[in-house]
Image (cartoon, grey):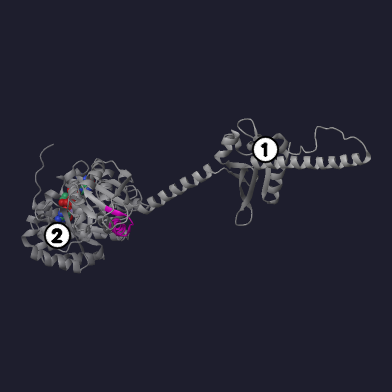
Amino acid sequence: MAAKRAVTPGQLCSALDKRKIVPFFQPLVHIRTGALSGFEVLARWHDPDHGMVPPDEFIPIAEKAGLIARLTESILLQAFASTIALQSNLHLSINVSPIQLRDDSLPDQIRRAAEQASFPLNQLTIEITESALMDNLEQAGSIATELKRLGVKLALDDFGTGYSSLRNLQALPFDQIKVDRSFVDSMACNRESRKIVAAVVGLGQSLKLTTVAEGIETTEQADILLWLGCELGQGWLYGRPVPAEQLPGVISAKTAATGGSLPRASASGLVAGLEPLPSHRLAQCHAIYNGAPVGLCFIDTEMRFVSINQRLARINGRSIRAHLGRRVSEVLGPELYSFVEPYILRALKGEATTGLEGRKRARPGESEDLVHLISHQPAWDEAGEVVGVSVAVVDITDRKRAEEALRESEAHYRHMVQLSPQVPWILDSNGMNIEAGPQWQRITGQTPEQTRNSGWLAAVHPDDLLEVAAKIQACIQAGDTIDIEFRVRAAEGTWLWLRSRGKPRRGPDGQILRWYGTAEDIQEHKRLELALNEAEAKIAALLNEKQLSATIAETGLHPVSNGIYPGSLDVV
Ligand code: G
Ligand code: G
Ligand code: MN
């Protein structure tokens, strides 16, 4: 292709006359929602002889030839007309050359153009590239103030490319900073660019300026920017500059349905659950920090305390100030430090630990050791790099104490039950065995499984079985106290007498929930009782026999020998 001849001021002038230089519109989008915010107006010159002349080429010529004000006016009027016709109340951003900030009539030019087209000036943003601002900041300042008075907003364009960005930012009343495309471009692969963008977005937030990222081409870039809290985005991902004829298409595509066809930052792992605005996130973090019943701190990669809340400072026995900026090793003392160090190091490698229990010896005057539950959570930045460790410390001394008390009382109870000669048992509301004390197995040899439900009846003496089963059923039905005696097969093949007594436990509306009772060994009692019964029977028999002998004697008959002789009563 033959080298193109440079355009001349004359050609530019005639192009302006013939309205050959036209506005193109590139969408500006809310990164979080994908909603259209407005358009940046970009001048385009399609010349039949020169082809597409880029603005980088004709803007400097216009500036030198004193045609820049005319160019701006022409672009403004056409852009206003095109957007007013659409009756959308979208924002327009227009570029002005820094040299125009030496022209005191600029505010008036803009006001007249807007009036002519009935375009509301509070929907207009003027973008000023920072490269050439500094030579007359004072004059630029008064022009900027006048523009603001008209309701126009100001954006500092290509932020970061000039050599005194911060001074410009301070000198002029900007509403917006546009992060230069070059940083956004290398952000995904270059840590430094990412950090610069993060810092610029943070700067914008702290100065309450809207931050706009230029040149967004991928969803990955959009994701990072969303994470960083950048509000507006512009770039090929959202749309290339289009001529006025295509505006209705872009606007309706965007307004159709929710979010429209413009891509929005995806909720990839990077931004999962990060719908709230960064300012909300920050406010929430502060609230958590101050209000949580948990000790919290943040440790950077150099193992220094970056932040700490009051509760953790108190746990550590030092003021917040005594922590900040200091190394963990310095603040905690050698013993505690050597305990936590491996977990901090592990977290810095990306590995979280939770549930670490630390015991802190009682200080003089404190009654007991403190027990803490500690977690170390790696904190990742927008590109998945660990930037520090978030530590949370919960005081679980009370819980530990309660746990110990419970354990002790359980042991106590277990001993009581196991060592007691009585066999505790539990039946459900239908009379089915749920549990029996360990003594049951010791006596009968039945395992807990064999004992369950009606299984225990297998150990009952066949002669007692029917009566036992019937009595229990009767009590269960009537809700009466159980009190039964029966024999069970003891492990050594003998029969052992038990007395079993139990009562129902009732629920709030009177229904029976469970039966609780104990069975006790009444073997000795039974033996004595049987012996007594037998003895009584014999005495009775003997008495009867004596009476009989007396009667016989009276009647002269001989006594009948049945092996029992008078005076042998003690032979039982
Ligand atoms: O999109 P594009 O390649 O056209 O932009 C190139 C440069 O030209 C950008 O820095 C942009 O700010 C600038 N530019 C585009 N249109 C205008 C305009 O109407 N006036 C001025 N002063 N600069 C413009
Ligand atoms: O300097 P200023 O920001 O005003 O100019 C915007 C420039 O950026 C224009 O040249 C425009 O065409 C260009 N541009 C807009 N979006 C993208 C993008 O996603 N990628 C690239 N490479 N350029 C873009
Ligand atoms: Mn611009």
Q: Is residue 281 magenta?
A: yes
Quarter the C terminus occupies: top right
Identify the amino acid type marked 1. Answer: Arg
Q: How many marks?
A: 2
To which residue does mark 1 refer?
Answer: 487
Q: Residue at x 7, y 55 (%)?
A: 64
**What range is drawn magenta here?**
279-296
Q: Residue at x 61, y 30 (%)?
A: 492
Q: Is residue 256 above or below residue 353?
A: below
Foreground disc of the pair 1, 2: 1
Q: What numbered label is drawn on residue 460? A: none
Image coordinates of residue 549 in percent, x first then y, are 87, 39
Which corner quadrant of the image does residue 135 belong to?
A: bottom left
Q: Is residue 27 visible?
A: no
Quarter the N terminus occupies: top left
To which residue does mark 2 refer?
Answer: 169
The answer to whether marks 1 and 2 mark residues whose Cβ atoms lie closer than 8 Å is no
Q: Choose between 168 and 22: the one closer to the eye.
A: 168
Q: CA distance from mark 1 to mark 2?
A: 99 Å
Q: Is residue 14 above or below residue 48?
A: below
Image coordinates of residue 526 in percent, x first then y, are 68, 41
Q: Is residue 227 magenta?
A: no
Left or right of residue 65, residue 248 in this image? right
Which residue of the protein is positioned furthest toward the right in this rendering? 555
Respond yes or no on whether mark 1 lies under 8 Å from ligand 2.
no
> For numbered disc 2, what is the local secondary structure?
helix
Identify the amino acid type marked 2. Answer: Leu
